[in-house]
Image: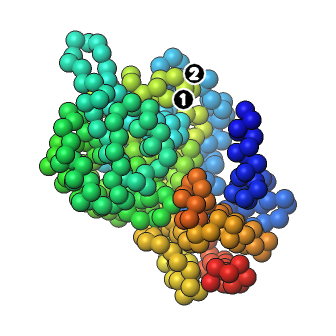
Amino acid sequence: MEYLRQLHKAAQDRDFYSDLRVVDEIPYPEIVIGGKPYLCLCSNNYLGLATHPEVKKAAVEAVERYGIGTCESRWVAGNLKILEELEAAIAEFKKEPAALIFQSGYAANIGIIPAIMDSFEGLGLPTIDNDENLIIKDYLSHISVVDGCRLSRSPTKTFKHNDMNHLEMILKRSQAKRKLILTDGVFSMDGDFAPLPDIVSLARRYGAMVMVDDAHATGIIGENGRGTPEFFHVEGEIDFEMGTMSKALGAMGGFVTGPPDVLGTLRMRSHPFMFSSSLPPEQAAGILAALRIIRNNPGLRDNLWKNVHRFKEGLKQIGFSLSNSETQIIPIIIGDVEKTIRMSRLLFERGILASAISWPAVAANQSRIRCTVIATHTFSQIDRALDIFREVGKESGVI
């Protein structure tokens, strides 16, 4: 207990803690904090669907019909018909044979990875021991992937970020009976892509399975918004595609797609699926509405990418370093923790919410302001934000 207090004080003394704002209302793309409106430039609500009238209407109708929750896991009495409908809709959207939903993206990863890789005794089948497995993950994989690997009790190695030579070296040296390659599709802190065609090629050559965390691509990347497999033309070649409903779909929850018989196995082996109450029905109804909007209104994605281009180009002209971002995630790399937090606070004083990201989310010397724009930002809002970023960047000594 005392050590935890000391750790807290040390972090406070170094100002390591980012400010935790209390949000009153979320009329995106602005949000209200302490009675004042702020332009939000750090939301994952990429298409603005969290507050879309059709999404809200569907959720309210579901509350009237079902209430606010099931109070049971799906194995007991929580397997509502609308949850089955949602799984079918996700599978159809992703052009996959089946889908399985979870309460969050984090729950999905810590449930899927152990279910795939942990040893299982019984049913008269030969057992592959955990020490005969190998998980190989990208260095910048999301922390939920890291925790899923730990819970799987399988040996895990990390390849250098997007380094296919390093990945192949690990695969070539491995004698494991069962191998799983893990990567994000779009990396949440840098906004760059994983080279999925190369990963798939190596996996096939060395007999490995591939799982892609496509949380930040689902709904917006690819011609139809189906994610990085569509973008890279490797649909049907990813063994397990995981995603979330808490980004572009505007709600909460996670999912995985794959063959029905394989997902049937995950249903009986994934602890978050088996031992947690199911996704609330109003969330399922809202997500179904969001999927319809994404399918019928591609103009939302067009608006998003126009805004992304305008904001990125403006930041580059000002002189900010944006790392290797290829997507809607726009990291302004500052490095110094204290300077990063100071810049975030100066932006907030001028009406911009753009959070500082530092350790433990990223390495302390890679601290950054992680920005995102959404489809419902206007050009005038983006231009006003750029003016403020220019002022604050100079004032804080970043540019």
Outermost residue toward the bottom in this view: 317
State how many labels appear. 2
Question: Which residue is pictured at 28% across the width and 38% down the height?
Answer: 134
Quadrant of the image containing the C terminus: bottom right
Residue 309 visible, this orientation: yes
| Image location (x, y in percent) of residue 276 | 55, 26
Q: Which of 290 and 277 is in front in this view?
A: 277
Identify whether 256 is placed above or below 94. above
Task: Name the residue that disc number 1 marks.
Answer: 278
Please, what secondary structure does the residue beneath circle 2 have? loop
Q: Do the residues labelled 2 and 1 touch (CB within 8 Å)?
A: yes
Residue 42 vertical position relative to residue 61 in the rendered view, above or below = below
Percent x, y of residue 391 = 71, 84
What whole-number distance in Å separates the C-alpha atoms at marks 2 and 1? 7 Å
Residue at 24 percent of width and 24 percent of height:
128
Q: Is residue 54 above or below residue 299?
A: above
The residue at the point 22 percent across, 53 percent down is 169
**Which residue is rendered at x = 58% and y = 52% of the image?**
360
Circle 1 — which element?
Answer: loop
Going from N to C along the chain, the mark reached first, 2 or 1, is 2
In the rendered image, the residue lying farthest to the left is 205
For badge 2, the amino acid type reads Glu
Q: How many residues crowd mark 2 within 10 Å: few (<14), some (14–19), many (20+)? A: some
Q: Which mark is residue 72?
A: 2
> Which quadrant of the rendered structure holds the N terminus?
top right
